[in-house]
Image (cartoon, rainbow, N blue to C red):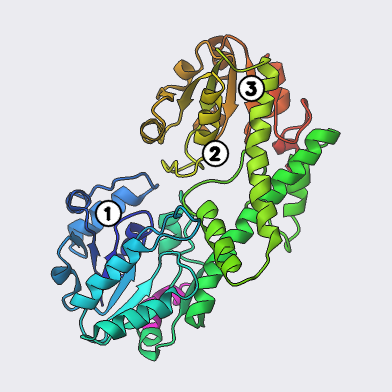
Amino acid sequence: MQVVIVGGGRVGLPTALSFARRGHRTVVHDTDAERIQELAAGRIPFFEPGLDDLVAEQVASGRLSGTIDPAEAYRGAQVAFICVDTPMGADGTADLRALLKAAETIARTGEDGLVVTVKSTVPVGTGARLTALFAERGGSAVHVASNPEFLQEGLALEEALAPTRILVGSDAARAREVLRELYAPFVADGAAWVETDLATAELTKYASNAFLAMKISYANALAEICDTIGADVVTLTQTLGLDPRIGAGHLRPGIGYGGGCLSKDLSALRTTLDGLGIRFGLLDEVEAINERALDGVLEKVRTGLGGLPGRRVTLLGLAFKPETDDVRMAPSLRLAARLLDEGATVIGYDPRAGEVAAKELSALEVDDDPYRALEDAECAVVCTEWDQIRSLDLERARAAMARPFVVDGRNAFDPTAMAAAGFEYVATGRPALGRSEERILT
């Protein structure tokens, strides 16, 4: 088939590669000319493990290309996947301007029988809205489907190439038929195929992200309790995760969830439900716990230092999670802003996200060497559990600091090892001294 991917970002490029690698002629349509030029050169504008090599390979093969010209993109295409951003608007709802602009372009350019498939996360009713839009514009007969993405940053390419589940919602028989054929090889390789209506598919994406946010907040609530009574949240959550009804994924406490999905999707779902008169108080508490997780880390730093004015604090990790350079809604930057507001000097280190973080928060100093970032620091806060941070030489790190005080917001280190290395160590929901995860698991 000829496939169009609308938007060459963190969802669009892995999606494009998943089809190009299966032999389909795949065209990325983006309004950003620089991004398309980079794609033609086999380069990508963000970090995602393995993506750059496969982009270069598929561009060289001729199966993957990009264009800013909609006429070129949609000529002969059977299916188009809309993968544009739907960021959180000022009122908490999803901002659909980029998606509606893409739909307008398709209405002018798409050919008869084109299946327009929305991968972007959108509120319930968006598919019906697009169907009405295409009907009003007349012209070509276009069929609308919802095919939400379930990609995790850091694993996006792996999950796009070998998805565990494929959800397709549509009220159009033609759309279901085309997508069934397109995804048949993925299903043959073991992906679960779920077919439903538009509204159910759209709601499922929000429900999935809200549930993941709930698991994170649940772990953070348990960490609060453990901090109070002196219990060990690591042992607790690992034991919970061994129950197959619960599962270990996203059941780790920290400084709160971030990134471009969970926060905005939770907000959009709450706003949508409010508009429908549906009370879902659990979501309110999920968000409140997320805020308290960040408050708790700040208080540990403030208390440990006896105040923040004039203090030098290093943040170890700036991306919202490892294996990405994404700092959207990153707890680290929110923490940095609050530390700065209270008079601290803040230095950040991240193996991938330093440059991006510095652009987001100009008052944040960034160093690409962790030991330089730790020089003369009176406190270090672990914000992202990168392997490069977990594997720091503790003796060297301690020697660099003015005061060896560490607040571990991700429980990246073994408290016993930190104490042995001479650190004042404050974990999240763990006693000051405790067994390592390795010993717990054996």
Q: Give how far across and how far down residue 135 sits, in percent.
A: 30, 85
Q: Amino acid at mark 1?
A: Val
**Labelled disc at residue 292:** none
Instruction: Give the quarter of the image for residue 180.
Output: bottom left
Q: CA distance from mark 3 to mark 2?
A: 17 Å
- The one nearer the camera, 163 or 331, is 331
Tell me if residue 82 comes above or below residue 340 in the rendering: below
**Mark 2, secondary structure of its residue:** helix
Q: Earlier in the sequence, mark 3 or mark 2?
A: 2
Q: Earlier in the sequence, mark 1 or mark 3?
A: 1
Q: CA distance from mark 1 to mark 3?
A: 40 Å
Instruction: Specify start and end residues of the magenta stretch as a single range.
Output: 179-191
The main secondary structure of the magenta stretch is helix
Residue at the (20%, 85%) spot, across then down: 139
Please tell me whether residue 219 belongs to the stretch shown in magenta: no
Mark 3 closeness class: few <14, some 14–19, many ≥20 residues within 10 Å: many
**Mark 3, secondary structure of its residue:** strand
For label 2, the residue is 331
Residue at the (48%, 34%) spot, across then down: 318
Q: Give how far across and how far down residue 101 sits, in percent.
A: 28, 66
Instruction: Give the quarter of the image for residue 172.
Output: bottom left
Residue at the (70%, 53%) spot, across then down: 285
Q: Amino acid at mark 3?
A: Val
Mark 2 closeness class: few <14, some 14–19, many ≥20 residues within 10 Å: many
Q: Residue pushed farthest right?
A: 229
Q: CA distance from mark 2 to mark 1?
A: 30 Å
**Mark 1, secondary structure of its residue:** helix
Q: Give how far across and how far down residue 146 sits, in percent.
A: 43, 75
For label 3, the residue is 406
Horizontal side of 152 relative to 74 (left or right) equals: right
Tell me if residue 356 comes above or below residue 96 in the rendering: above
Mark 1 closeness class: few <14, some 14–19, many ≥20 residues within 10 Å: many
